[in-house]
């Protein structure tokens, strides 16, 4: 009976009919509207819900198409996937969100590669030549999907600390990568030429070669560049999904994949620009995560250390304060405590703003999301280009867990690995307070000259604890 139920035809829509096309148009229109609403923190939640509605319509439409069967497997897969996704999303910490994004992106790439293999097997089973307008997108999806899946897994492992964040390369790395790429292209050309009876063995060999290539491309990239890599791999997954949409003649998949691919590409370029580096440099320079003893150990230079009470006095009697959040704020979950500091200062008439660097944290918008969670008004969040001209007139800049994005070596030391990278110029403020556990380097693995500037005071403490103490001290003044 269960078998009969699983094979029961429930389809009511013709794949090429007007009804299915109309529903797909509604679905991808909601995707576009959701992305548009997601570009602003105040409407991002609504944008997510709109996009979810679009995806629900797309999935439901696909399941109702003529030819869909095996409902037992489909329902079981949906239930398992939904359960894993919901539980993981609820339990994940904000500090681990980049890893989760990498994993979800990898799952998408893996799904695309498996669909490509399934379509090849289906085409072979028909005993007819597979049309090139179907086979070529299938081969493209297989290669890019496999690269994205395995590359995303490496990115996850580096961010999670399962493998070293420093660049890991094999001897002759570029030669090996080139040979793998040539082999993959040759295999795909062979399969396209022999489209009447394509060899599954060659397809599987190309799939495995793409998997190895995905690993080898990401392993030599340092931890500092993982957010950019994740964004790039996300674009790859989107492009592969769009190609799969052409192979399956699925309009919604084409549009959704194109949206993901284009937005991921734009985001990758913006992040690279924010670091003053090219995407090629990020992929092949092996930058970030320098090992101890290779430029990653703080120099023995004098620093000025203060306590929470001294910091409170500096802040309470200032006219303007700019807070610069970084990954350390996320780790300490200090956003609410920092908001308490800002509230206490505003009660005293002190102007408070937040300076947001495009690559602060481990993913774009990381700081915006954290501060929005603490109900920080969006109007107080200032972009780097907007806040830098005001820094010389700022009484106190408070750096909370940020490192590389405020390092003056980027503009003062032409030999620095981050030379030329746009930074938030907190060193131009009259006074600087850096809340940090130690003098340890950031993701770039280099010492931060800001810590030793004459106008900088270091408050060595957990960001949440320090902010809580500072807010209490200000309240007592």
Image (cartoon, rainbow, N blue to C red):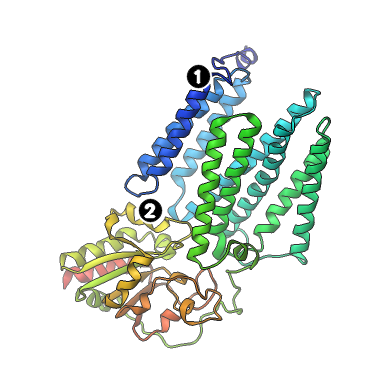
Crowding near pointer 2: few (<14 within 10 Å), some, many (20+)? some
Dot 1 falls on a residue whose secondary structure is: helix
Please indicate whether residue 398 sits to the left or right of residue 295 in the image: left
Q: Which mark is residue 246?
A: none
Residue 371's image quarter? Answer: bottom left
Which residue is pictured at 71% across the width and 49% down the height?
211
Please indicate whether residue 452 sits to the left or right of residue 186 in the image: left
Dot 2 falls on a residue whose secondary structure is: helix
Residue 276 percent across, percent down from the top left: 51, 68
Q: Which mark is residue 369?
A: 2
Which residue is pictured at 52% across the width and 19% down the height?
18
Which residue is pictured at 50% across the width and 67% down the height?
275
Residue 37's image quarter? Answer: top left
Crowding near pointer 1: few (<14 within 10 Å), some, many (20+)? some
Residue 112 percent across, percent down from the top left: 64, 38
Q: Earlier in the sequence, mark 1 or mark 2?
A: 1
Relative depth, front residue between 172 and 136: 136
Q: Is 159 situated above or below 414?
A: above
Q: Which mark is residue 19?
A: 1
User: Is any part of residue 459 visible from this angle?
Assistant: no
Residue 392 percent across, percent down from the top left: 30, 78
């Amino acid at each position: 009976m269960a078998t009969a139920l699983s094979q029961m035809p429930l389809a009511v829509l013709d794949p090429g009919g007007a009804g299915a096309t109309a529903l797909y148009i509604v679905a991808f229109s909601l995707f576009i509207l959701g992305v548009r609403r997601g570009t602003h923190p105040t409407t991002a939640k609504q944008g997510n819900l709109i996009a979810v509605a679009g995806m629900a319509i797309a999935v439901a439409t696909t399941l109702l198409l003529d030819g869909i069967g095996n409902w037992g497997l489909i329902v079981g897969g949906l239930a398992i996937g939904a359960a894993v996704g919901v539980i993981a999303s609820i339990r994940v910490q904000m500090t681990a969100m980049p890893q989760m994004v990498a994993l979800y992106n990898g799952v998408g790439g893996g799904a695309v590669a498996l669909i490509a293999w399934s379509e090849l097997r289906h085409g072979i089973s028909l005993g007819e030549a597979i049309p090139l307008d179907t086979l070529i997108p299938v081969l493209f999806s297989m290669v890019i999907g496999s690269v994205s899946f395995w590359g995303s897994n490496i990115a996850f492992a580096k961010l999670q600390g399962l493998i070293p964040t420093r660049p890991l390369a094999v001897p002759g790395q570029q030669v090996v990568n080139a040979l793998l790429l040539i082999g993959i292209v040759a295999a795909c050309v062979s399969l396209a030429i022999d489209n009447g009876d394509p060899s599954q063995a060659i397809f599987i060999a190309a799939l495995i070669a793409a998997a190895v290539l995905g690993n080898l491309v990401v392993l030599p990239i340092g931890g500092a560049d993982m957010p950019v890599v994740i964004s790039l791999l996300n674009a790859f997954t989107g492009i592969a999904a769009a190609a799969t949409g052409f192979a399956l003649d699925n309009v919604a998949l084409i549009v959704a994949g194109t949206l993901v691919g284009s937005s991921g590409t734009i985001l990758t370029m913006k992040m690279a620009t924010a670091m003053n580096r090219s995407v090629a440099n990020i992929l092949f320079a092996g930058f970030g995560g320098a090992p101890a003893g290779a430029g990653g150990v703080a120099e023995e230079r004098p620093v000025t250390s203060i306590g929470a009470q001294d910091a409170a006095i500096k802040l309470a009697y200032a006219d303007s304060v700019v807070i610069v959040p970084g990954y350390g704020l996320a780790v300490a979950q200090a956003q609410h405590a920092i908001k308490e500091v800002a509230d206490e200062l505003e009660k005293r008439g002190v102007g408070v703003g937040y300076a947001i660097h495009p690559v602060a944290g481990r993913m774009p918008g990381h700081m915006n999301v954290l501060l929005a969670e603490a109900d920080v008004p969006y109007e107080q969040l200032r972009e780097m280009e907007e806040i830098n001209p005001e820094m010389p007139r700022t009484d106190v800049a408070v750096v909370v867990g940020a490192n590389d994005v405020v390092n003056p070596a980027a503009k003062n030391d032409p030999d620095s690995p981050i030379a030329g990278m746009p930074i938030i110029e907190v060193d131009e403020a009259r006074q600087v307070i850096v809340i940090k556990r130690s003098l340890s380097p950031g993701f770039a693995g280099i010492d931060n000259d800001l810590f030793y500037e004459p106008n900088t005071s270091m408050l060595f403490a957990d960001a949440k604890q320090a902010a809580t103490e500072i807010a209490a001290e200000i309240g007592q003044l």
